[in-house]
Every structure is written in structure tokens, then in C-alpha cells.
Amino acid sequence: MNLENTKAQMRKGVLELCILSLLQSRDAYASDIIEHLKKSELIVVEGTLYPLLTRLKNAKILAYRWEESTSGPPRKYYSLTESGKNALNELLNSWENLVKAVNKTVSKP
């Protein structure tokens, strides 16, 4: 069993929930999202994040706007749409149910 692969898959499984949760309180650009996820020990690389953001945008879960930057090129800021807010609520409910179910099943030695 490849434990590192299993742990990585577990992190990827909750990544969408975490991104939507981050965007719930404020708009953010990709580098900012990556920084927040790294601080939370959900290590994510751009190659993982950008396709996910694009998929969420195409599903109308996220919207974006371009904003000028004082330190380089314009930045694409992502925000939740109304559909995104609804999706986040559904994912949060599912997450809570999953955590309860896992906690009932898993016991530490």
C-alpha cells in the first residue's frame, strides 16, 4: 500500500470544499488560494489548482474578474456565485455527515 498516495487522494477529495470555503469570506486569486491551503497543510501545486478552478468556473460555481496589480500583471480574482454558495452548503452538510460516519467507524488504538 502506498500511504503517501492514499493521503494525497484524501487531501484532493476535500480540496473543492476547502477552496469554496476560502472564497466564502472574500475573493482571492490563485496564488493566495495556494498560500492559504499550504498554511493549512493541504499542499497544492498550480497544476492541481488551475484545472479545478477552471472546472468550477465552467460549472458556474465560481466567477472571476481581472484586477490590476501594483506588483506585476493583472490578477484573476475568483468569487463564489449563487450556485457556488449553494454548492458549498451542500458540500458542508455532506462533509459533516462523512466526518460523523468516519468517527463512528474509526477508532484509534
Image: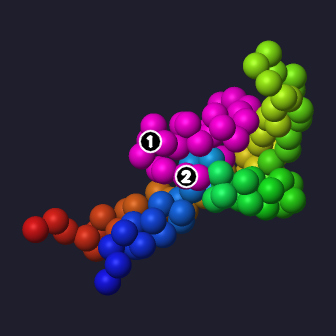
Q: Quadrant of the N terminus?
A: bottom left
Q: Is residue 89 visible?
A: no
Between the C-alphas of marks 1 and 2, the distance is: 10 Å
Q: Is residue 38 magenta?
A: yes
Residue in the picture at 42% in, 73% down: 5
* Number of callouts: 2
Picture quadrant of residue 94: bottom right
Report which residue position mark 1 lands on.
40
Residue in the picture at 40% in, 73% down: 6
The amino acid pointed to by label 1 is Ser
* Residue 38 higher or lower than 87, as above or below: above
Q: In this view, does 4 lie to the left or right of 38?
A: left
Residue situated in front as seen by the camera: 15 or 75: 75
Counting from the top left corner in percent of width and height, residue 68 is at 87, 22
Counting from the top left corner in percent of width and height, residue 42 is at 47, 50
Q: Can residue 99 be seen in this view?
A: yes
Report which residue position mark 2 lands on.
44
Counting from the top left corner in percent of width and height, residue 100 is at 37, 62
Furthest toward the front, the residue is: 72
Disc 1 packing (10 Å; few <14; some 14–19; many ≥20): few
**What residue span does the magenta drawing correspond to?**
20-45
Residue situated in front as seen by the camera: 13 or 71: 71
Furthest toward the top, the residue is: 70
Q: In this view, does 34 lie to the left or right of 79?
A: left
The amino acid pointed to by label 2 is Val
* Secondary structure character of the magenta stretch overall: helix
Query: Under tag 1, what secondary structure?
Result: loop
Protein image colouring: rainbow
Query: Under tag 2, what secondary structure?
Result: loop
Residue situated in front as seen by the camera: 1 or 18: 1
